[in-house]
Image (spheres, rainbow, N blue to C red):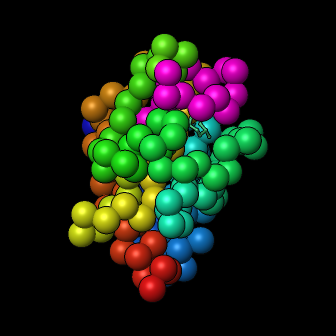
């Protein structure tokens, strides 16, 4: 991870420390990520409800994709595969559901607890191939921090 990733992770960890409400925790996370990482042009969280991913808090332009069925789009693929997906060139990926014509690359990280998908972090960038191992590592750790709060909010 770069200094920037480390700083963003520290800020999110600090911001989530006393945050037990799922909605607030998700808002704090997207606000801090977009503040610390200038390449993140759209930063949002989807929550899994039944077989659909429902858009929660986000920073960026409004997305037409407020509900995405499992298996559709890059978001639906990551949830179905229970694995992070990085797409260097969204226009070359047939799964991609467009949100903005400026978007060039995307990373989707499932938020999971005990092997169950609760939601996911979805980040777009206007720069091609903007996401690397540092982003993946940081976002997977943040997904781990969010998971218990999302699970509790569901119970
Ligand atoms: N690009 C996503 C859809 C969500 S928007 O980027 C906000 C996808 O292909 O699943």
**81 is higher (above) or lower (below) than 106:** below
For the question of whether residue 120 can be seen, the reply is yes
Q: Position of residue 25 (x, y in %)?
A: 53, 69
Q: Residue furthest left?
A: 114
Q: Quadrant of ligand 1?
A: top right
**Quadrant of image for the N terminus:** top left
**Quadrant of image for the C terminus:** bottom left
Relative to 143, 26 lies left or right: right
Residue 106: in magenta span: yes
Q: Residue at 50% of width from left, 21% of height from top?
A: 94
For the question of whether residue 145 can be seen, the reply is no
Relative to 53, 147 lies left or right: left
Residue 148: in magenta span: no
Between residue 117 and residue 8, name the one nearer to us. Answer: 117
Boundaries of the magenta span: 94-107
Which quadrant of the view contains residue 71?
top left
């Amino acid at each position: 991870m770069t200094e920037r990733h480390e700083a963003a992770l520290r800020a999110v960890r600090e911001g989530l420390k006393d945050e037990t409400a799922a909605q607030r925790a998700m808002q704090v996370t997207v606000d801090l990520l977009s503040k610390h990482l200038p390449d993140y042009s759209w930063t949002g969280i989807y929550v899994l409800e039944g077989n659909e991913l429902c858009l929660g808090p986000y920073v960026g332009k409004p997305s037409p994709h407020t509900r995405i069925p499992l298996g559709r789009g890059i978001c639906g693929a990551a949830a179905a595969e229970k694995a992070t997906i990085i797409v260097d060139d969204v226009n070359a990926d047939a799964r991609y559901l467009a949100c903005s014509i400026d978007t060039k690359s995307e990373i989707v990280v499932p938020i999971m607890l005990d092997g169950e998908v609760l939601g996911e972090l979805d980040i777009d960038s206007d720069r091609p191939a903007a996401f690397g191992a540092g982003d993946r590592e940081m976002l997977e750790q943040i997904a781990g921090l969010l998971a218990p709060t999302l699970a509790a909010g569901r119970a």
